[in-house]
């Protein structure tokens, strides 16, 4: 379609004398010293200068021109009708594509908005269940985890008798004591020397992982996907 339009414009302009000319319409309007900028089977576009020096770009239908000008511009009613139909079809197709893309983009926007709300909800739960504590590293678990014992500045019956835990994204030499904040994952880790509740120190990473697992639960019996309330028995399996 675009090639057809371009062909019409190039063909007609190639046979025109593009020197300044006067254009008169059938209602008697006269445009002096115009420069034709584009010719289509159904319309002609031209530029002219108003009395105040302003440049104006104007389009006029071929049917509004005098017979002499129609002949000069190679006007054909049949070609004009076909061209107008092609333009209408092109515009209709473009409108449908625009609506389709708009709907798809709006769907993506709604999905992203829901994703953000779900992520904020999980972050709020994680923050509510956070534990500010000291971690005494018992041993490293390469590449970036450890087994450690947890102690808090003030004892609390909320967490019961804290034992040994698998802590993700925290590492260091044996016997290192690190002050940090840990977040429950709702998972347990089975190693040769026992089963350990799993905590994580990466707040944003853990929130994203939980959201992904809620949408696509992992097919595994070892790892337990946390519930929406992140209810987690701290002492489960602890040593």
Image: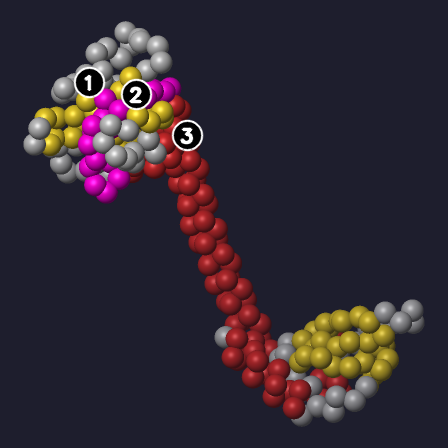
Write down the quadrant of residue 135 in the picture: top left
Q: Residue at x 33, y 27 (%)?
A: 178
What main secondary structure does the magenta stretch of the protein show?
A: strand
Residue occupied by mark 2: 229
**Which of 86/231 is in front?**
231
- On the picture, is 110 further left or further right than 170? right
Q: How far across and how far down the image is residue 200, in percent?
A: 29, 30
Q: How far across and how far down the image is residue 115, in percent?
A: 39, 37
Measure how far apart labels 1 and 3 are at the Cα level. Answer: 30 Å
**Which of 216/29 is in front?**
216
The answer to which of marks 1 and 3 sits earlier in the sequence is: 3
**Residue 51 can be seen, yes or no:** yes
48 lies above or below 234: below
Write down the quadrant of residue 8 in the picture: bottom right
**Which of 100/43 is in front?**
100
Q: Is residue 126 magenta?
A: no
**Residue 77 can be seen, yes or no:** no
146 lies above or below 6: above
State which region is magenta. 128-149
Residue occupied by mark 3: 120
The answer to which of marks 3 and 2 sits earlier in the sequence is: 3
Q: How far across and how far down the image is residue 191, in percent?
A: 11, 32
Measure how far apart labels 3 and 2 are at the Cα level. Answer: 13 Å
Q: How is the image coloured?
A: secondary structure
Q: Residue at x 61, y 88 (%)?
A: 11
10 Å neighbourhood of mark 1: few (<14), some, or many (≥20)?
Answer: some
Secondary structure state at the residue bearing disc 1: loop
Residue occupied by mark 1: 163
């Amino acid at each position: 379609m675009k090639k057809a339009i371009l062909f019409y414009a190039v063909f007609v302009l190639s046979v025109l004398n593009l020197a300044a000319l006067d254009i008169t319409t059938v209602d008697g309007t006269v445009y002096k010293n115009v420069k034709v900028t584009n010719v289509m089977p159904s319309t002609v576009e031209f530029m002219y200068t108003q009395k105040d020096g302003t440049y104006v770009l104007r389009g006029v239908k071929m049917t509004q021109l005098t017979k002499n000008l129609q002949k000069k511009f190679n006007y054909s009613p049949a070609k004009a009708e076909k061209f107008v139909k092609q333009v209408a079809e092109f515009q209709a197709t473009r409108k449908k594509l625009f609506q389709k893309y708009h709907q798809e983009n709006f769907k993506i926007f709604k999905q992203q908005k829901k994703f953000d709300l779900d992520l904020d909800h999980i972050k709020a739960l994680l923050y509510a269940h956070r534990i500010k504590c000291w971690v005494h590293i018992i041993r490293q678990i390469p590449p970036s985890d450890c087994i450690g014992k947890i102690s808090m500045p003030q004892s609390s019956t909320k967490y019961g008798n804290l034992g040994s835990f698998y802590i993700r994204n925290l590492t260091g030499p044996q016997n290192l004591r690190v002050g940090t904040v840990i977040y429950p994952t709702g998972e347990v880790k089975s190693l040769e020397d026992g089963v350990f509740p799993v905590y994580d120190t990466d707040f944003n990473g853990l929130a994203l992982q939980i959201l992904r697992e809620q949408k696509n639960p992992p097919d595994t019996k070892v790892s337990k996907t946390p519930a929406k309330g992140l209810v987690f028995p701290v002492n489960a399996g602890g040593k």
